[in-house]
Image (cartoon, rainbow, N blue to C red):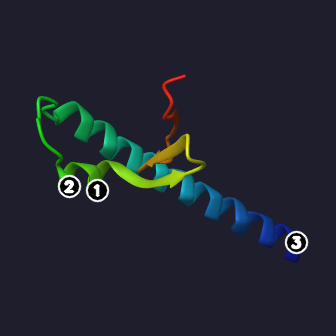
Amino acid sequence: MKTLREFIETEKAKQMTAQRGSADLDAVLKRLESEDFTLNEYDDVAVRQLIEKVTVESKDTITVQFKGGFELRKDLNGD
């Protein structure tokens, strides 16, 4: 019974995390749909609302993690 309860609690926690990620992704998509992308300068507010973190993998590669869990890996050499 104890093992089953622990399993149920673990699954509930996973489901809550997935729901939060889904809600974050929905918020990002709404922001993208409403955003005017004709900006000519950096917008700190937009960046902070859309991007969770940027990781420098190497001198040639970065990974951008958007809120909601979507990740984009970018080669800085253009290849």
Say whether disc 1 or disc 3 marks the residue closer to the N-terminus: 3
Say whether disc 2 or disc 3 marks the residue closer to the N-terminus: 3
- Where residue 22 sits: x, y (%)? 46, 46
Amino acid type assigned to the residue bearing label 1 in the image: Arg
For residue 16, what is the image quadrant?
bottom right
Vertical relation: 40 (above or below) 16 = above
- Where residue 9 sits: x, y (%)? 70, 69
For residue 3, which numbered disc appears in the image? 3
Label 2, on which residue? 44
9 sits left or right of 44 in the view: right
Q: Quadrant of the N terminus?
A: bottom right
Identify the secondary structure beneath mark 3.
helix
Pair 1/3: label in front: 1
Q: Is residue 1 visible?
A: no
Please rate how many residues cluster around mark 2, counting C-alpha atoms within 10 Å: few if below 14, some from 14 to 19, many from 20: few
| Residue at (31% x, 46% y) in the render | 27
Amino acid type assigned to the residue bearing label 2 in the image: Asp
- Where residue 71 sits: x, y (%)? 52, 41
* Mark 1–mark 2 CB contact (< 8 Å): yes
Vertical relation: 75 (above or below) 67 = above
Please rate how many residues cluster around mark 3, counting C-alpha atoms within 10 Å: few if below 14, some from 14 to 19, many from 20: few
Pair 2/3: label in front: 2
11 sits left or right of 25 in the view: right
Label 1, on which residue? 48
What is the distance, in whole Å, between disc 1 and disc 3 at their CAs? 41 Å
Identify the secondary structure beneath mark 1.
helix
Q: Is residue 16 visible?
A: yes
Identify the secondary structure beneath mark 2.
helix
Amino acid type assigned to the residue bearing label 3 in the image: Thr
What is the distance, in whole Å, between disc 2 and disc 3 at their CAs? 47 Å
For residue 36, which numbered disc appears in the image? none
